[in-house]
Amino acid sequence: MTTNVIRTTTSVSTRISAGLICLFLGSTIVFTVGLSHISAAHNAAHNTRHSIGFPCH
């Protein structure tokens, strides 16, 4: 039985950049929806916000 192994390497700077981009996008989504006064956005994320301890009202 033969197995094909594909190995990829990424530089540290690429991983740090990807992590920072994900952190920025995630924070933007959480705080945009979390601080939104639109009732549809509020209701859609209400239980999730309370489960992670994010105050919404």
Image: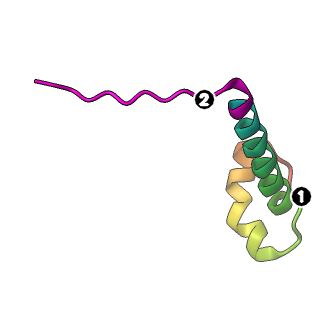
At x 75% / y 51%, what residue is drawn? 49
At x 76% / y 37%, what residue is drawn? 17
In this view, the residue in front, 5 or 21, is: 5
Q: What residue is shown with label 2? A: 10
Report how far apart the C-alphas of labels 1 and 2 lie in the structure. Answer: 43 Å
Q: Was residue 43 drawn as part of the magenta stretch in this picture?
A: no
Q: Amino acid at mark 1?
A: His
The picture places residue 41, in percent across and down from the top left corner, at: 76, 70
Q: What residue is shown with label 1? A: 57
Q: Secondary structure at mark 2?
A: loop
Residue neighbourhood size for the residue with mark 2, other residues' Cα within 10 Å, grouped as few (<14), some (14–19), many (≥20): few
Q: Is residue 25 above or below residue 43?
A: above
The picture places residue 24, in percent across and down from the top left corner, at: 81, 47
The picture places residue 36, in percent across and down from the top left corner, at: 87, 67
Magenta segment, prevailing SS (helix, strand or loop)? loop
Mark 1 and mark 2 residues within 8 Å of each other at the beta carbon: no
Residue 53 quadrant: top right
Q: Amino acid at mark 2?
A: Thr
Q: Is residue 37 left or right of residue 7?
A: right
Q: Quadrant of the C terminus?
A: bottom right
The disc placed on residue 30 is: none
Q: Which sits earlier in the primary sequence, circle 1 or circle 2?
A: 2
Q: Is residue 35 above or below residue 24?
A: below
Q: Is residue 12 above or below residue 20?
A: above
Q: Which residues are magenta?
A: 1-14
